[in-house]
Amino acid sequence: MSSMPEKNYLTEKRGLKSWLLTLDHKRIGVMYLIGISISFALGGIFALLIRLELLNPGRDIVGAQTYNQLFTLHGAVMIFLFIIPGIPAALGNFVLPLMLGAKDVAFPRLNLASWYIYVFGALLAVVSIFTGSVDTGWTFYTPYSTQTSGAVVTMTLAAFILGFSSIFTGLNFIVTIHKLRAPGMTWFKMPLFVWSLYATAIIQVLATPVLGITLVLLILERVLGMGIFDPAMGGDPVLFQHFFWFYSHPAVYIMILPAMGIISELISTFSHKRIFGYRAIAFSSFGIAFISFLVWGHHMFTSGQSELASMIFSFLTFFVAIPSGIKVFNWLATLYKGSISLDTPMLYALSFLFLFAIGGLTGMFLATTATDIHLHDTYFVVAHFHYVMFGGTVIAFLGGLHFWWPKIWGRMYNENWAKISALLVFVGFNVTFISQFIMGIKGMPRRYYTYLDQYHRMHGFSTIGSWIMGLGFFIMVVYLVHSIYKGRPAGSNPWGSLTMEWETTSPPPTENFAGDMKLTHGPYDYDKIVPRTD
């Protein structure tokens, strides 16, 4: 078996110091990948403990207070440490300059600073676990978050710090996309993953400061008793919800837009076909980004807001489904009569189409005020949220990870084990959360430590699904780590893709390309060019 090229970003400079002080976007992307993988493992352990506790009514392994802390930590770790930075900061950092034909991002030092800020925020969040933990839920709703004991200030300060990492990454990507595209790469010859990162970066820059201000106000309320959210001092606890969701609903699209960009790359590559409706997919990303700022009130149908406000937010929530539907239609049209290869990344892309469709359609129930009143705060919401976040963002992340893994490490993973893992994750996820839709419709409230006997069978079914999913992830870790050391060399373009990152070696050299790049064809010109595979 031949070895990897001697000089590449992994081997050119050795030693821990060379990594910690690197300005290479590829190494920073790998360090982000390691950080978010650890965060995902931690959040997954919390999830398995939650499901184990819910296997039977009453206490199994932890008490009620610890259970509250577990679901809070699961949500906070998964949202702030994994899903939000996952695709942009890890995969985006690695492949964005390569897809543009650039040597690096526009501001390498800012890029490194964003990683250190992420690490600092993540460590502070972990510290909060051991200094009292948090039991508020990941949304930190007032008035409970201003009154409960625990490390609320530490955890919210961690989220505040993590926001700066997100803003820096977004600014870097915007400037990189504007200024560092290779000659010949016009706006409408950019890969759709780049378009999705661009739309995401705009949301990161515009929406994240709102969360920062909200968390600072919460900290001031707890530390100084300022009364911003305290009705006894002229404050309003519902104001916190308005502030929080004005950021957090656009944040949903910080999570899902890059995932949609990955799916566009996977479907076109493994269908060996020009993407259908390129401009419609590109512009729909901006449609989603724009409307995402206008729909926060659908989280608050039961908060006492006016009927007129609820009606407007309901309409806008239905409206945001249109650009998402455009994407799904165009992906299906691309698959039609394509020469489809069912490699592991494509299996994840097809899983995404199925799971995200369920997440989107069940969102229509929650967008309707009449049904939302019944379903609000039940397991139906938990299932819907996971079908969008896991079935959408995480599944697409896994597809992108398997797609670009050969480019990152220069090695191929075991395809058979990868397909088994993908199947286990898909089956385990559906077993876990389909049952939660049923429980929610029947009235099972979320975040409850125990439950009535009538929900016992469904909770048991859901817990077994979590074990199946956990087994799939365990297998994934084993074969991916094994591939780094024992996998066969990947070659520069194992999938036969036409985007520019596949025109350099795997792993890429420090400067990304041997010389200056010039675009000679579009990213999806499969009807004009037969891509090489090696």
Image: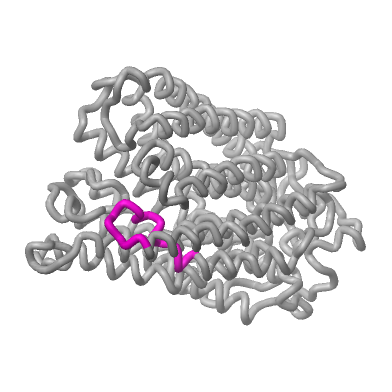
The percent coordinates of residue 247 (x first, y second) are 39, 64
Image: magenta residue range: 292-307
The residue located at (24%, 60%) in the rendering is 238
The residue located at (37%, 48%) in the rendering is 77
The answer to if 299 sits in the magenta stretch is yes
Q: Nearer the viewer, residue 134 or 372?
A: 372
The residue located at (38%, 54%) in the rendering is 299
The residue located at (58%, 59%) in the rendering is 258
The percent coordinates of residue 246 (x first, y second) are 38, 65
* Figure check: 205 above or below 134: below
Regarding residue 437, the answer to whether it shows in the image is yes
Side (left or right) of 432 relative to 282: left
The percent coordinates of residue 337 (x first, y second) are 87, 47
Colour pattern of the rendering: one colour
Placement of the N terminus among the 4 image quadrants: top right
* Figure check: 1 above or below 316: above
Regarding residue 503, the answer to whether it shows in the image is no
The percent coordinates of residue 20 (x first, y second) are 44, 61
The answer to if 318 sits in the magenta stretch is no
Quadrant in the rendering for residue 52: top left
Side (left or right) of 161 relative to 519: left
- Number of marks: 0
* Figure check: 534 above or below 174: above
Q: Nearer the viewer, residue 4 or 393?
A: 393
